[in-house]
Amino acid sequence: MSSAFGPDFVFGVATASYQIEGAVREDGRGPSIWDTFSHTPGKISDGTNGDVACDHYHRWESDLDLMVDLGVDAYRFSIAWSRIQPSGSGPVNQVGLDFYSRLVDGLLARGIQPFVTVYHWDLPQGLEDRGGWLNRDTAFRYGEYAGIVGAALGDRVATWATFNEPWCTSALGYGSGEHAPGASSPSGAVIAAHHLNLAHGFGVQALRSSGATGRVGVVCNVHQFYPASDDPADAAACDRVDAVANLLYTEPMLRGRYDPLTVEVTRGVTDWSFLVDGDLDQICQKLDYLGVNYYAPSYLAAGDNPAPPTPWPGDVQARWLPPRPPLTLMGWTVEPRGLTDVLVRTHERYPELPLVVTENGVAVADVVSPDGLVHDPGRVAYLHDHLEAVAAARAAGVPVQGYFVWSLMDNVEWAHGHTKPFGLYHVDYATQARTPKDSAHWYQQFVASQR
């Protein structure tokens, strides 16, 4: 890979606000749906929550120094909406906004580009109480919020993402109930998806009208599906699932339409009455890049629709095969070629956009050895092989401009709590000590080798 990445390629690390910040009741921050969800018995596998998390709110300066040690070019982080507007609308909480301003300045002082995700799943509870993403008004409130952060930080932020993985918000939050707010309705998943798409369009417009000078895009977990056999029915199953997993978001955002197959698959769960004239014009805004998150592919065969509650709304006519070993701690297949294929396929469908791998990483059952170190050869191998997969996509002509490891450090892995560590740095939650894993040293050396 010595010649695979040029001097302009961006290497980074990524985190999300709820997963690392803690300080959930400090300096005017309001509750989010993840605060509510994580305090609901039985929702988080190990009973933990993000009240303290990695205490990044108080330790951000030393955490930025970890990135200096890694030698990365950029840091992708998200803003907690309820720090800026505690109830999701109304007056700005200046103390919360100042925190992110200091964070941006701290990055720039260290020569690291800020890559800001405006929304990473933590909707203010006040908005959820009014219907959340099932309420069309939430899209308008999001546009106002995006304009606020754009005006405050836009002169210093290199890259913006309106949303992280809207599929997870709609399909897991409102379809299967696995994520906050824990609703389970096939029609709700589609309605939420449309309102997220609409909010994305409002957000792009608000960021640009606010005077923000950086690039603006969106981050999607573009699912990679493989048919279980050469049977055309298996390929058709992949297409039908693709229609609600990927095209439900990318087609309106990038082509100003809902794909006919998306509408066909979901006709049995919604009449699409939520789609208002002019919505698609609002949703489809010119973007500067598309962020692609990738962890693992899925293998599908033709079959019956998954039993509800399901994150796959509609008549997908598909059966998921068991993941193929080797498996990660999450139970996901390790298959680097899936990253190459998803980048190539996305480029073929949307050739006008440069791509950024905005998340890629692996959960490993890490342990601190008697020597006080964390040896994680599985993560080292995973990162090496997936960077090779990015290099293969670039060699095939895909304009991939960056790669971000998920995650900088172990954190609250949503409904899995502390049980699925993804970090380059181990976190001792009792002491908040950060320990670089072997993968951190490997990534530092790899990034340095590309300079």
Image (tube, grey):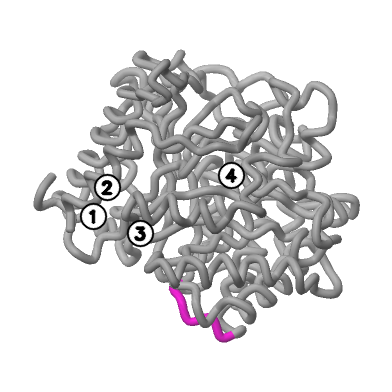
**Sequence-wise, which precedes: disc 4 or disc 2?**
4
Q: Residue at x 40, y 30 (%)?
A: 296
Q: Residue at x 35, y 28 (%)?
A: 379
Find numbered disc 3 in the image and state the secondary structure of the residue it sits on: loop
* Residue at the disc numbered 4: 167
Q: CA distance from mark 1 to mark 3?
A: 11 Å
Q: Nearer the viewer, residue 434 or 44?
A: 434
The kind of residue on which mark 1 rests is Val
Q: Is residue 449 above or below residue 85?
A: above
* Residue at the disc numbered 1: 398
Find numbered disc 4 in the image and state the secondary structure of the residue it sits on: helix
Crowd tier of the residue under label 2, counting other residues whose Cα lies within 10 Å: few below 14, some 14–19, many 20 or above:
many
Q: Is residue 167 visible?
A: yes
Discs 3/4, front: 4
What is the number of the mark on residue 350?
3
Q: CA distance from mark 4 to mark 2?
A: 20 Å
Dividing the picture into quadrants, the one containing residue 38 is: top right
Q: Is residue 351 above or below residue 164?
A: below
Crowd tier of the residue under label 1, counting other residues whose Cα lies within 10 Å: few below 14, some 14–19, many 20 or above:
many
Crowd tier of the residue under label 3, counting other residues whose Cα lies within 10 Å: few below 14, some 14–19, many 20 or above:
some
Q: CA distance from mark 1 to mark 2?
A: 6 Å
**Sequence-wise, which precedes: disc 1 or disc 4?**
4
Q: Which quadrant of the rendered structure holds the C terminus? A: bottom left
Residue 201 x %, y %: 60, 69
**Sequence-wise, which precedes: disc 3 or disc 2?**
2
Find numbered disc 2 in the image and state the secondary structure of the residue it sits on: helix
What are the residue bounds of the magenta stretch?
A: 211-215
What is the number of the mark on residue 344?
2
Q: CA distance from mark 3 to mark 4?
A: 19 Å
**Sequence-wise, which precedes: disc 1 or disc 2?**
2
Find numbered disc 1 in the image and state the secondary structure of the residue it sits on: loop
